[in-house]
Amino acid sequence: MKQFYRLAALLLALLLLCGCAAGNGYGKPERKEGQDQYLTDPVPEGKPQPVEPQDVTVGETEYTCTISISCASILEHMSLCDKEKAELVPEDGWLLKPVEVTFQQGQSVFDVLQQVCRENKLHMEFSMTPIYNSAYIEGIGNLYEFDCGETSGWMYKVNDWFPNYGCSRYQLQNGDVVEWEYTCELGKDIGGGYAAMPMIQAKAVEYYHWLTMSEFTDLMTIAEMTPGPITVNSATFVGIRMAGIPGALVATMGCILPSLIIVSLLSWLYEKYRSMDAMQAVLACLRPAVVALIASAALTILRVVVFAGGVISVSTVQALYVALFIIALAVLRIRHSNPILVMVCCGAVSLAAKLILG
C-alpha cells in the first residue's frame, strides 16, 4: 500500500508538471511589420495566398473537394471536457467522415463548411470578425471553443497545411482535402505547429529583436521545408542565427526538454513499479487500446494512399499505389528485405510514374 501511495504522489506531481504549459494571453491585436491589412503574417512560400471574400465572384464551373469534421482529440482529453458536452462527442470522434462534395469556382473553405453542415443537419455557429476579414467558427456539433479548456477550439487544414488566415479567405481549388479538427492544446495535439508561430514572432522579432521580419519570413519557409515539427525547426533556426551551433543546441533542447523530462519520468515510474499488480492491471488495459490506435493510424494512411482524397469508392482507387503496397508487403513478408530500402524503392517508382505519366 505504501508503494501505491508513492506512485500516486509521483503521478500527481507529473500531472502538475504537465499543467505548467499554459500559454500567455495577448491583448487587442495590433498590426505588425510584415502583416497585411487584416493582420495576417507572411504566408510560407509555395502556399496559397489569402483571397478577400468581397473581391471574389463565384463562377459556374463546378469542382470537387473532400471535407471532414473531427473532434477525436477530445477523446484523449476527456478530463478537460465540459461534463455537459461529453455526451456529444461520438465514440469514433467523427462528426462528419471524409466526404466528397461539389463546389463552385471561387468558393471558400467557409462556404463549403456551411454547405455540408446544412446538408448533414449538423449544427454550426460562427461570427464575422471584420478585423481579420473572415468568419470565425465558434462551434460545430454544439462543441464550442473553451469546452475543453482555455486553449481549445476549431482549426482547419487544407492538404495537410494549417493556414495562418481565416477560412473565409481560403479559396478552394479542385481536389483539395479540407479537414476541420477540434484542438484541446492550441493545435499541438493535432499537428498545428503554426499555432506557436505568433508567440515565436512576438519574442524573437518584437521583444528581443533577434530577427528582422524578413528573417522571420525566411524562418517560416525553411522550417516548413525541413523535416520535423515546425516549432522545433524554428527554435533551432533562431538559436543558430544568434549563437551558431551552441545556440542551436541550446534552443533545440529548450524546446524539447519538457517532453523529454515527462517521458523520462514515465519510464522511470514504469521501471520502478512495473511489478505492482496495479501497474500490471493498467498496462493490461492499455495494450489493446495501443494496438487499436496503431491499427487505426495504419488504416487511415492506407485509405488515403489507396483512395484519392481518402474517399472510399471504386472511382477513387489509385491502382499504382495498390500495386506498390501489395508488392512491398510481399517483399517484406517473403524476402524479409530492409524496410527502409523497400520504402525508398516504392518512392522512386511512384516518382518515376508521375514524371512519365504526368
Image: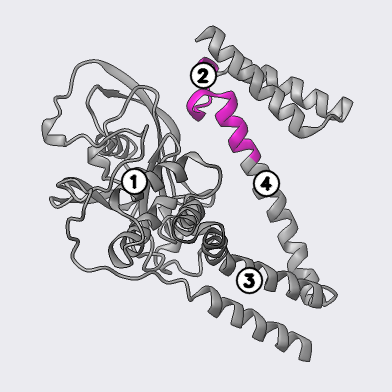
The residue beneath circle 4 is 294
Structural distance between the alpha carbons of marks 2 and 4: 25 Å
Instruction: Please report the residue visible at 80 percent of the width from the left and 77 percent of the height from the top.
Output: 272
**Left or right of residue 158: residue 78:** right
How dense is the environment of label 2, judged by Cα within 10 Å: few (below 14), some, or many (20 and up)? few
Neighbour tally class for label 3: few under 14, some 14-19, many 20 plus, Cα within 10 Å = few
The span from disc 1 to disc 4 (Cα, nearest Å) is 36 Å
Where does label 3 land, which residue? 261
The amino acid type, in three-letter code, at marker 1 is Thr
Where residue 301 sits in the image (x, y, percent)?
A: 60, 35
Q: How far apart are the two marked residues, 1 and 3, measured between alpha carbons?
A: 31 Å
Q: Nearer the viewer, residue 210 or 273?
A: 210
**Residue 31's spot in the image, x, y percent?**
17, 56
**Which residue occupies 33% across, 58% down?**
201
The boundaries of the magenta stretch are 298-316
Q: Nearer the viewer, mark 1 or mark 4?
A: 1
Which residue, as the protein is rendered here, is positioned at the far front?
244
Q: Which residue is mark 1?
A: 217
Q: Quadrant of the N terminus?
A: bottom right
Q: Return the disc, 1 or 2, that comes first in the chain's sequence.
A: 1
